[in-house]
Each structure stands twice: as C-alpha cells, then as structure tokens.
Amino acid sequence: MALDLANTVIFRGDPERSLDRFDDPVELPRFAEAAAIFRIGEWGKVQFHPPLSQKGIEALIGIREVINSLFRSAVREDSLKAEDLSTFLRLGSDLVCNEPEGRDLRLPNLSEKKRELSLGAAAFLSAMRLLDPARLERIKTCPNCYWLYFDESRNRSRRWCDMNVCGNRAKARRHYNRNVKQAGNNHV
Ligand SMILES: [Zn+2]
C-alpha cells in the first residue's frame, strides 16, 4: 500500500510526462477506496479515511514523498539514507499521533473486526513493514514506467511492475528496434 501511494505520481523519472494524481482532489477518496479493496489480504476489513483539510493533504503528500525517496534509494543504492529515514519516522510519528484514540494499528491484521485508519497513518505502517530486510530486497523499480513494486515471485525474477502492461510494451519496442535494424541492413 505504501508503494501504491508512492505510485500516485505517474512517470516520476520523466519531468515532461510526470503527473500527480492527487492534483485532482477526487482522486484521494478514490485511492482510499481502491486501497482497501486491493490490500484486504494485508489489512483485513478496513476503511481508509482520506484527508479532508489542506493540512491533512499536505501531511499525506509529505509521507508519500519520503516513502518514495526512501525506497527508491534503497533500490538504487542498496542502502537506507539517514536523512530519509529520519524524516519518514518524524512524519509517521505525527500521523500516528493524530489518529483518534482506540484505533488498532496492527499490520498485518488478521482479525475479522472491521476497523478504520487514516490513509497517511496506514501508509506509514505499511512502509514500516517493508523495512524488514526480507521485504526490502524485494522492492524494485519498473524500467518502463518507474513505478515502485514488490516482487513476490519465488526467485525474485520479476522485471516489470506488470508484465501485461510494461513487459509487453518493452517486448514490442525491442521487436520494433530489431526490425528497423534489419531493414537498415538490407539497404547496405
Ligand atoms: Zn511499469
């Protein structure tokens, strides 16, 4: 879920194509709803509350951006940076502190009881879980769309965020380049 949140900025590596889904405020509740459905295995029955105030939105964007840079440098440089980790813990601590009293913060949650959490606090808890070295080494970036993804394959051999989308696109591009080259050679 933390990575899904980081991926709400599309094409991060390309300033010309880069797009922040949360520039449109209707995307916040939409994301919260989708996350509760897609991540039910990890969270159990849950309702994520998107932020409503401007301050709340800024806090969510803050944790999103530090999650992004924390895990991206973990992939790129094989290390966690002190500055990112410290900002992550500080912002996460504020988010958790603002949760109404009595909320259950366990993750994964295997109980049947439905619970509620703010989107920002949930993203922080999800990212905390990814810091476990056995999970951290499974985080990768997609060479086509720059998304962060979690490789669940047994031998960690997944190369794309989604084979049906980015994998096929890359395959088509290789095929095209090869054909162009061959066509060029024929002219010589
Ligand atoms: Zn991709």
Image (cartoon, rainbow, N blue to C red):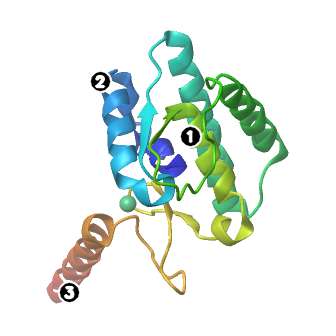
Verify CB contact (< 8 Å) between mark 3 and mark 2: no
Q: Circle 3 sits in a helix, a strand or a loop, which is it?
A: loop
The residue pinned by badge 3 equals 188
**Foreground of the two, 183 or 105:** 105
x then y, percent, for residue 92: 69, 34
Question: Which residue shows up at 45% across the image and 48% down it?
Answer: 4
Quarter of the image where the C terminus is located:
bottom left
Quadrant assignment for ligand 1: bottom left
Q: Is residue 124 left or right of residue 38?
A: right
Disc 2 crowd rating (10 Å Cα; few below 14, some 14-19, many 20+) is: few
x then y, percent, for residue 162: 34, 66
Verify CB contact (< 8 Å) between mark 1 and mark 3: no
**Above or below, 40 relative to 15:** below
Of the two numbered discs 1 and 2 in the rendering, the one whose residue sits closer to the viewer: 1
**Above or below, 35 relative to 39:** above
The residue pinned by badge 2 equals 26
Q: Is residue 154 left or right of residue 24?
A: right
Counting residues from the start of the chain, the first of labels 1 and 3 encountered is: 1
Verify CB contact (< 8 Å) between mark 1 and mark 2: no
Q: Which labelled disc corresponds to residue 88?
A: none
The residue pinned by badge 1 equals 122
Of the two numbered discs 3 and 2 in the rendering, the one whose residue sits closer to the viewer: 2
Of the two numbered discs 1 and 3 in the rendering, the one whose residue sits closer to the viewer: 1
